[in-house]
Image (tube, rainbow, N blue to C red):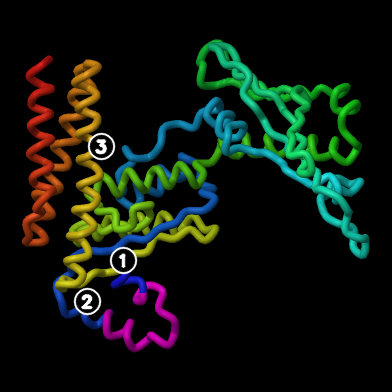
Amino acid sequence: MTALASFYVAPAANHNRLAAYTDQTSRNPLLGYIVVYSVFRGQITLADATAQFRDLRLNTDLLPGPLRADDAFLRVTGADGIRDTYRLDTLRDDGTDAPVPGAPSPAGPVRSASLMIRPVRRDSQRIVRHIVRELRDESASTLAYDTHLGEVVFERDSASSRSGRMVIRLDHDAIAAELSPAEQQRVHALVRAVQEQHRWQCEYLGADRIRTLLREYMHRLDAVPVRPTGGVYFITADHEATLEGLHQFIEGLGHHSMFARIPLPDETEMRQLIITSFIASAKDALQKLSTDIATAQRTGVTDNKRKALFDRFRTLKHQAADYSQRLETGLGDTTSSLDLVETQLTALLQSQ
């Protein structure tokens, strides 16, 4: 991506260079596009997303399934869900966590508390989690817990385990006995946040679902990851109409979400960037596939799993052939790795 970075983030001083690059892409054949995207918030309903996909001629099969109340519960109360951490020495009576203007800085070690939601049990009728307070004392490097300030429960409907309702029951006696009035306000604020976020997750797709959707779309377009951590891909020029549709969809989300397409002229330096990126991506995918095949040989495999392994190999082989032809180059070690994985896969198929 180094060769492209100065064009994409070019300041005003590089205007002439960017203009020259743009003019160059208009003269040279187009190799494809570098796609850069980021998604924030994602406040769109599934119904609205479906309607937009149809209007933009995008593949509605790649949209997520119906939003589920139990999934929303797990998102909000899980490890990456809502929690609240605050310092006790700067906690005001109204529950805000900030020093009083003009007050001297507290002396001594810092004491802080965290309100979090921890899993307790899960069965076919209920998912039970507790609101827990963790007290941290830096002077003694110790932790103490109030383990049951309340319950956050998802009660499943009898007709469907995926639907139901969230119920929050606070242990008011324990809260009054253990927490100051200021901390009690933090508990009630946490409860309100959980309720609000659960309602939001039940209604809107959210940024994480849309990122998953984009990753799946990139996979379907045989995109080549240019950055290992994701979010930057190379896509061939024949998918221009689809990229325009995805651009309009993501830009319409607002909240600083973006989907940018940088045209890549067919030049030696640009071509080498894509070759290097494809080889690295294919190597990782083939290594993972090889490991999964070896595991299947040891533990046994179902017909569906065997088909899934074969489909992954066929997709990788097709991509290698396609990019080898497009880039007019041999892929060296990638071809050898494909042959090795094909041998493994053949052995697996024959052993069943």
Q: Is residue 191 visible?
A: no
SS under mark 1: loop
Closer to the camera in the image, 324 or 248: 324
Residue 109: % across, % down = 82, 48
Q: Main secondary structure of the magenta part?
A: helix
Q: Quadrant of residue 2?
A: bottom left
> In this image, 248 relative to 334: left or right?
right
Viewed as shown, does residue 173 lie left or right of 340?
Answer: right
| Residue 100 percent across, percent down from the top left | 90, 58
Q: Which residue in the structure is indicated by mark 2?
A: 25
Q: Which mark is residue 288?
A: 3
Distance from Cα at disc 1 to Cα at disc 2: 17 Å
Task: State which region is magenta.
Answer: 6-21
Q: Can you see residue 6?
A: yes
Which residue bears the numbered disc 1? 1
Q: Residues within 10 Å of mark 3 (few under 14, many from 20)?
A: few
Q: Mark 1 or mark 2: which comes first in sequence?
A: 1
Can you give x and y, in whole percent of width and height, for residue 228 in the image?
34, 53
Q: Earlier in the sequence, mark 2 or mark 3?
A: 2
* Magenta stretch holds residue 14: yes
